[in-house]
Amino acid sequence: MPHTPPDAGDSAPVGRRAVLGLLGLGAIGVVTGSSVQNGLSQMLAAVQMRDPTGLTSQIPLGDTWRYYSVTGAVEPRKPADYSLKVSGLVDRPTSYSFADLEGLPQTEFDDTFQCVTGWSVPDVPWRGVRVSDLLEPAAPTDDAVGVRYKSFDGTYTVNMTLEQARADDVLVVLAMYDEPVTHDHGGPVRVYSGSMYGYKSTKWLSEIEVTSDNAPGYWEDRGYPLDGFIEDE
Amino acid sequence: MSDSIEIDRFVLAERLVHRVFAVLMVVCIVTAAILYNGALMMAVGHRHVVETIHVWCGFALPVPLLLGAASKAYRTDLGILNRFTRTDWRWLRSRSRRDGTIPVGKFNAGQKINSWLVAGSTGVLLGTGVLLFWPDLVRLSWRAGATFVHDWFALGLGLLVVGHVTYAMRDPEARRGMRTGRVSRSWARAEHEAWADEVTRNVTAGRGAGPQARRQ
């Protein structure tokens, strides 16, 4: 169907080329974006550190945190009012205050927070109590299969198998960046698993329930894999 | 001819495409801001609901653009937007491009470029959005790349939309053209002289199918 405009003689279909060019640029960006982004953010990290306005953190340079919440505004909880229950299929259900958790042996390491959708924040300093150190005194019963992390946002849950939860890099986090975990990061206490995608790292943790199954949690019910291990590059 | 004469600029199909695309785009932008900005996310929450609205409005974006192709006037205008003439280059480079010395057709060079960038960016956002929404499709480093591309193209498209709306706010007659389909002949002569002349010629020649001028 020719729709040649009257001035087609001295004209060229630049529009089609521009659109195809943008699509090509997008495709190249998908394939190389990961490394381009790393270079860019290293270059501009110095600028970001000195930016008092915080505007540069809104530029999509990568390596920036993105804050997720699946409910309405979550009521912030102070460490003084905080308690963590270890419940379910255990011989000794336990409840820890924030001070109790601080009194337990602490594990510290730097590791990447990796979201399943692709964004990540490298080398985050984490400190907290290993989940295995909370499970052991509670003594899961013989029919225990998994643990269910529950959030005091009232909605979010996620599961791990007992074996996954006992890994050395699964923490009940009390501090990030050597500071108390902020409310936006899921403080005062959140989960972090170094080997798994972010959706396994429950924010605003209130309870670790030992369960007889490994049931899908909030995002797994909405399509994310139950096995949340970060794939190898 | 007097200034009370009106010229048909956009047929109903084109105005509907524009309206539906604009509504979807605004919803995409508002939900994108909530998903992206930490303070907004924390205030609004309900990430899954916001994400679902964003994703499906995004997937719907090309639908009005494709359905519009059923209209002959829409296809003709697409053809005009697609082609860049020597006059368009001259208009772009000229410092006095707004004074009317270079006769502009139905769309000026800026409008053409805007349409390409919006169309291309929408396509890129759609493609990368698919990769983000179904994380099983490609490997992690490509998903990271898709996030990177999605963020930057979203920023670019957001700026294009802001520019587009800014120009529209300055020109009530241009807005009326998109709202009612008609513009005054005097506006057309001032902003799109070559097009105004062409429409007038067609009417004088009594060609029924083309754009029409009518006396109010």
Image (cartoon, coloured by chain):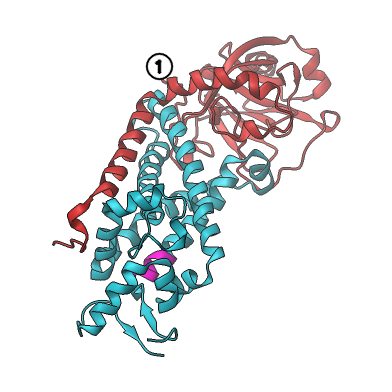
Q: Is residue A187 above or below residue B101?
A: above
Q: Is residue B163 above or below residue A39?
A: below
Type of the residue with mark 1: Asp
Provide the chain ID for the residue under circle 1. A
What segment carries the magenta color? B14-19
- Image coordinates of residue B202 in percent, x first then y, are 23, 78
Q: Image quadrant of residue A49?
A: top right
Quarter holding the N terminus of chain A? bottom left
Q: Secondary structure at mark 1?
A: loop
Q: In the rendering, what colour is chain B?
A: cyan
Quarter holding the C terminus of chain A? top left
Q: Image quadrant of residue A85?
A: top right
**Residue nearest the observer in this picture, A176 or A6:** A6
Q: In the rendering, what colour is chain A?
A: red
Which residue is pictured at 65% across the width and 24% down the height? A48
In the image, is residue B15 part of the stretch drawn in magenta? yes
Pointer 1 residue: A232
